[in-house]
Image: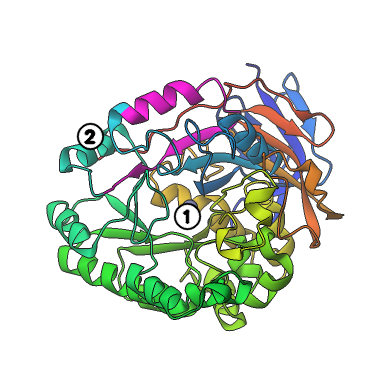
Amino acid sequence: MGIKVLINGFSLLNGENAQKVAILFDEKIIDIRESDSFDLSFERIDVDGSLIIPGGVDPHVHFNDPGFTSNETFSTGTTAAAFGGVTTIIDMPCTSLPPVTTVNNLKNKLNIIKEKAVVDYSMWGGITPESSFEDIEELYRFGVAAFKSYTISGMDTFKALSYSDIEKIFNHFSGTNTVFGFHAEDFSVIKNSIEAQTDDELKTVQGYLKARPIEAEVVAIKNILKLAKKYDVYIHIVHISSKEGVNLLKDYPKASCETCPHYLEFTGDDLYNLKGRLKTAPVVKNSEDREFLRDGLSNGSVNFVSTDHAGVFWGDLKLNSDFSKVYNGIPGVQLMIPYLFSEFYEKTLSLKKMIEISSENAAKRFKIYPQKGAMLIGSDADFTILKKEEWLLDESQLQSIGKYSPFYQKKLSWRVVSTFVRGVEVFSIKDGLKVNFGFGRYIPAQVD
Ligand SMILES: [Zn+2]
C-alpha cells in the first residue's frame, strides 16, 4: 500500500480545538503536521475543509452473528458502522449462538465473521451462571475486551447472574485488571413493578415505563458497586440511563459507565409517539436524567457513548399492539457519530472532548488504545471525515436489517462523508461501501 497524505482537513493537534492539519499515512499514521510539507511524490487526498477525527469506536453492539442473523449479521452491522464513521465495534457476547462464554465459542464466532466484517472488531466475553473461573481466565488471556453479565435477562440462551454469583466471581478475580460490565437493572424491582399492574396496563407504553423504573437501575448498581468495592475489581455499567445511577459511581475510581444517544435525546414522554422506534431496555427516563447524562459527557462522570445497537426487521416484532411484546432494541451504530457531533460539537463540547467520548475513552477502557481511538504516530490510520451539512435521515438508507430509528425526524448538522480503516477508504458518501466483506480484522485487547 502506498503512502498517502490527507490535506485541507481540520483536526486536533494539541489543545482543545480544531486546526488545519496534513496527515501522512499508510496502514498506520506516519506523521501529522500543521501544513503539507511532505514529499511531493505521495498521493494527496484533499478533504476540502472537512473535520478529521479518529475513527469512531462503538463499544457496545449486538451484531448477532452466528445465531440471530435474521436481526443483524456482521456484514450488515459493520456496513452500517462504516457508513456511520465507526471504524471499530466491540460486539456483545450474549446475542450469538453459542454465546461467547468460552474460548472455543469465541474461535467459532471469529471463524464465521471473518469473511463478513468491513470494519475492525473486538469482542466482549460473557459470564452466565454456567461459566467457570477457567472459562473467564481463558477468554481474558485470548484478548476479550471485558466481560458482560446481566442482573436481569430476557434471553433463554444467556441467563442472568444472581448477586451471590457476582460475589463469587469478584472474590476470585479480586485485585485483577479484568473489567466486569453489567446490564444493571434489578430483577426483583422489575418483577414487583410488573406484578403491581393489570394485564391490560402492561400492554401499554405507560405500563412498560412503569415496569422498568429508575429504581431498578439504582438498586442493581448499588449492589454491584458494594461488591466491587469489597473485592477491589473494575466494573463498567453499560447503557446507563439515570442521574442517580451515574451519581452512585462517582466515588469509586475503578467504575466507569457509558450512555447511549437515545438516553441523551429522549424521555419517557417521547415513547408514546415513537413507540417501537424507541423501545429499549433500560427504557428512556425523565428530562432530569437526560440533562444529567448530557452534563456527564462534559464533566466526565459519563465516560463515553455507545449505541447498544440491537436492530430487528421492522415488522411484527416492532409493531405488536401489545407493547410488552415489542422487541427491545434499536439499530444505532450508523447514527452515533453524526448525532453526537450535531448535538454537542461547538455547542457544549470541544473537539478534544468529542473525540474522548466517541472513541478515545472506550478504546482506553477496553485496552485497544492507542492502536484504536487515537490519531498518534503509529496508531492505525482509522479516520472519520465529517462535513457540516444539514440533513435528515432517510430510514431506507440505514444499512442494518432494521431500517428504523427514533432519530428519523431529527435535523442533523454533521454528516460522515468518508471512513478510513487502516489507511483504506471503506466508505464514501459518493460511492457507498468500497471494500469487500472480510476486510475487517479482529483486534484483541491488550493482555497484561
Ligand atoms: Zn446491549
Q: Residue 428 versus residue 78: which sits nearer the camera?
A: 78
Q: Is residue 119 magenta?
A: yes
What secondary structure is found at the residue carrying circle 2? helix
User: On the rendered image, what quadrant is the C terminus found in?
Assistant: top left
Q: Which residue is mark 2?
A: 138
On the image, the x and y values in percent for residue 5 come to 71, 30
- Residue drawn at x 71%, y 55% as measured from the top left: 405
Q: Residue 135 versus residue 415: which sits nearer the camera?
A: 135
Magenta range is: 105-128
220, above or below 137, in the image: below
What secondary structure is found at the residue carrying circle 1? helix
Quadrant in the picture for residue 163: bottom left
Disc 1 marks a residue whose amino acid type is: Asn
- Residue drawn at x 57%, y 74% as measured from the top left: 200
In the image, taking residue 7 as reference, residue 135 lies left or right, namely: left
Q: Residue 335 versus residue 390: which sits nearer the camera?
A: 335
In the image, taking residue 433 as reference, residue 24 lies left or right, namely: left
Mark pair 1, 2: CA separation: 25 Å
Label 1 Cα crowd, 10 Å radius (few <14 / some 14-19 / many 20+): many
Q: Which residue is mark 1?
A: 361
Disc 2 marks a residue whose amino acid type is: Glu
In the image, taking residue 298 as reference, residue 395 lies left or right, namely: right
In the image, taking residue 208 as reference, residue 94 lies left or right, namely: left
Instruction: Indicate which label's residue lies in the foreground, 1 or 2.
Output: 2
- Residue drawn at x 64%, y 64% as measured from the top left: 350
